[in-house]
Amino acid sequence: MTVTHEPPQTTAQDTPPAPAPPGQQATPVVAAESALATDPAPLPPPTAPAPQDPGATYGRAHAARMYDYFLGGKDNYPADWEAAERVLEVLPTARTIARTNRAFLHRAVEYLTRTAGVTQFLDIGTGIPTEPNLHQVAQGAVPEARVVYVDNDPIVLAHAHALLRSTPQGRTSYLHGDLRDPAAIVASQEVRETLDLTRPVALTLISVLHFLPPGHDPYAIVRELLRPLPAGSYLALSYATTDFAPARMARAAEVYRQSGVALRQGTRADAERFFDGLDLVEPGVAPIHRWRPDPGAGARVPDADVSMYGAVARKP
């Protein structure tokens, strides 16, 4: 693993409850006093197993819809509101983490298109569309950019089909796929018809690997996803860490688990392992708000308020 200064140029089963009204975040279904409690009441037992299978219903929390809630979105449901509010009780910076992670995605895509010359993206763990979306950033720089969005939540894919429209010169496609089956993703018709795997592809895994349930090796999954991509391809990812606020992050992981959502976290060394054999772009693995921040971005938030590492690296 090396750090490069500048890479070479390359050319539903349940009847859904009503979501929040457009442009307005729904009022969470929690007690008014909960935000002020110093000792939250014990959580009930999980109502669903940790693995979130593709048939997830509206009646249980899902990581993508909780993330949408943290971002102030409207495409989430009571189970998501309740779980997200319980996370906020123990991790008050969860909204900051979500916004900072989204900003990291935008900067990474800007770098990949404008500096590295990448025009193809495989985005796994897409989540609920939040503007600007990956393809909008990529096609804003390179109108002919092509993007495959992958998620295992049918609700996410329904929103993606409705909202994620390509430029006439480029293309976007949508795959109902599962990160736990990387071979199926790479072999899918959507990937094969949208992306040219003889040319560099950027694999983006933003805030998704830490939601893999126990029993799945995230490093092996990343290696399998990278294997068919040609030299000159890139990996961009972000990963939750306990390095800066271990007690808070541990409590948040327990709330996620008891809501039916697995959440793993690691150290900087754990994050660096994803990039073994790749050439890291400066500044290497860093807290996501410190990875190539925009000029004039203003005062940085404390690392403990973000608690996530990110990096971009090139496949030699």
Image (tube, rainbow, N blue to C red):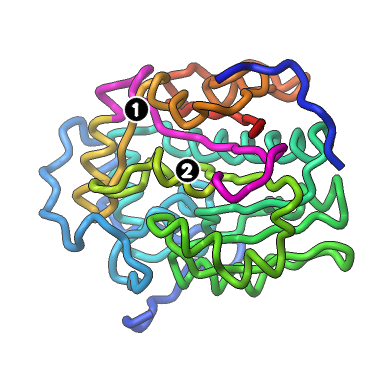
Q: Residues within 10 Å of mark 2 (few under 14, many from 20)?
A: some
**Residue at the image point whose x is 30% and y is 55% from the top:** 82
Q: Secondary structure at mark 2?
A: helix
Q: Residues within 10 Å of mark 1 (few under 14, many from 20)?
A: some
Depth order, front residue of 290/143: 143
Residue kind at label 2, given as amino acid type: Val
- x then y, percent, for residue 304: 42, 20
Numbered circle sitting on residue 266: 1
Position of the N terminus by quadrant: top right
Depth order, front residue of 268/77: 268
Asked where in the image residue 80 lies, by quadrant, the reply is bottom left
- Residue 230 part of the magenta segment: yes
**Residue linked to disc 2:** 222
- Residue 256 part of the magenta segment: no
**Residue at the image point whose x is 50% and y is 54% from the top:** 125
Asked where in the image residue 171 lies, by quadrant, the reply is bottom right
- x then y, percent, for residue 20: 49, 67
70 to the left or right of 194: left
- Residue 187 seen in render: yes
- Residue 32 seen in render: no
**Residue at the image point whose x is 44% and y is 66% from the top:** 153
- x then y, percent, for residue 70: 47, 47
Cα separation, mark 1 vs mark 2, equals 16 Å
Residue kind at label 1, given as amino acid type: Gly
The magenta region covers 226-249
Position of the C terminus by quadrant: top right
Mark 1 and 2 residues: CB-CB less than 8 Å, in contact? no
291 to the left or right of 267: right
